[in-house]
Image: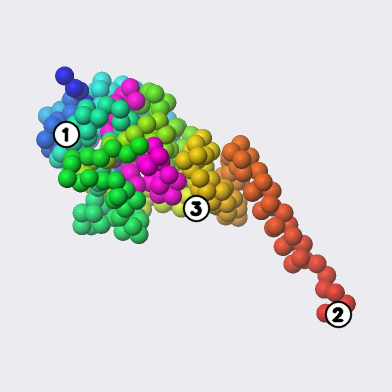
Amino acid sequence: MISTSVVIPTYNCESYLRQTLESVFNQTVSPNEIIVSDDCSRDNTCDLVASLATDSPIPIRLVKGTENSGGSSRPLNLGIEVAQGDYILPLDHDDLMNKERIELQVGALETCPQCILAIGRFSVIGHQPNDVSELWPVSQFGEFSHVFDETKVFSVLGSEIAFPPLLRRNYAASTSNFCFSKARWRELGGFNEKVFTCPDLDFMLRATLKGPIAVVHRQLFQYRISQSSLLRKDVTGSLLEATMVRLRAASAEPALAGDEIEALRYSAMMLGTAVLRKGDFSGFHAMVETMVKHGGASTLGQTVRNKARRFKASNSEPSDDSK
């Protein structure tokens, strides 16, 4: 008998959590359990979960961290660690599951067990289905239209197809789009707790390097854009972290990354300089360490030399002819 666990990392989300849980209750195939993993909320989130668990049609367990981690990776890992399901379906605390999500994603992985994870289409809350213009100027899976057979429930993408586009854009969008076995989660080493704003991208990159993924040709969840999210609180810092995550992944598989590696090095340098101007010395230091470790020392050195020449030129004394 296949068992599934929905894992919801949460922090201060009592205003949305009831609706999120109700979307899990409405699945065509119910999960065996719901794990709510709280990252030390300061509102009434834990009381709300306890109240809802009393009359829930699905067992709800509350897991509490010992201190706020500052991101979703730690509560995700805590929740998955105690989960008893064979398959794990993460769900952000303010997103909504579409009714067939569990049925379709677990079905894809059962049909194609070599796949590391399953993802699918999604909609943005308040927008029409397939309208992802709030996130990207292109369609969600535009890069793969030539390999998709949408007469089938899902398509399988190998590493050589699924990995390169992630170096430019995270077409999965969120951990709410993931379904994977607990065994695969262990193989991948879980979610990286040193990545705060884009753990979904980091996990997705590692998954696509590990093996093929399944893409379900159906709307699986509804994504809520929150202006208070970590991603949007510091856009430049978030872009820098995502660039460093991509650079590390690209350096692990340069044959698949191709020319994107050098583009990522340049972007990391520019974004590192931008966060330094804002006084983020730790972000700049992390960028330098990543560049040196992953072959970007020459790019770093050339950029520093160019800036030094421009600084020297702008501060030099004018010649006699110009006086």
Q: Which residue is mark 1?
A: 103
Q: Is residue 231 left or right of residue 16?
A: right
User: Is residue 147 visible in this depiction of the protein?
Assistant: yes
Q: Is residue 185 left or right of residue 284?
A: left
- For the residue carrying disc 1, how many other residues have a C-alpha within 10 Å: few (<14), some (14-19), or many (20+)? some
Query: Residue placed at 74% from the left, 67% from the top?
Result: 314
Query: Residue placed at 37% from the left, 41% from the top?
Result: 162
**Magenta-colored stretch includes residue 163:** yes
Say how the picture is coloured: rainbow
Q: Which residue is mark 2?
A: 321
What percent of the width, then of the height, locates residue 11? Answer: 34, 38
Residue 309: image quadrant is bottom right
Q: Are marks 1 and 2 in contact (CB under 8 Å)?
A: no
Hey, what amino acid is under mark 3?
Answer: Thr
Q: Quadrant of the N terminus?
A: top left
Query: Residue placed at 33% from the left, 44% from the top?
Result: 172
Say what secondary structure mark 1 lies in: helix
- For the residue carrying disc 2, how many other residues have a C-alpha within 10 Å: few (<14), some (14-19), or many (20+)? few
Residue 38: image quadrant is top left
Say what secondary structure mark 3 lies in: helix
Res 236 label: 3
| Gap in angstroms between the C-alphas marked 3 and 2 | 44 Å
Q: Is residue 316 left or right of residue 39?
A: right
**Magenta-colored stretch includes residue 48:** no
Hey, what amino acid is under mark 1?
Answer: Glu
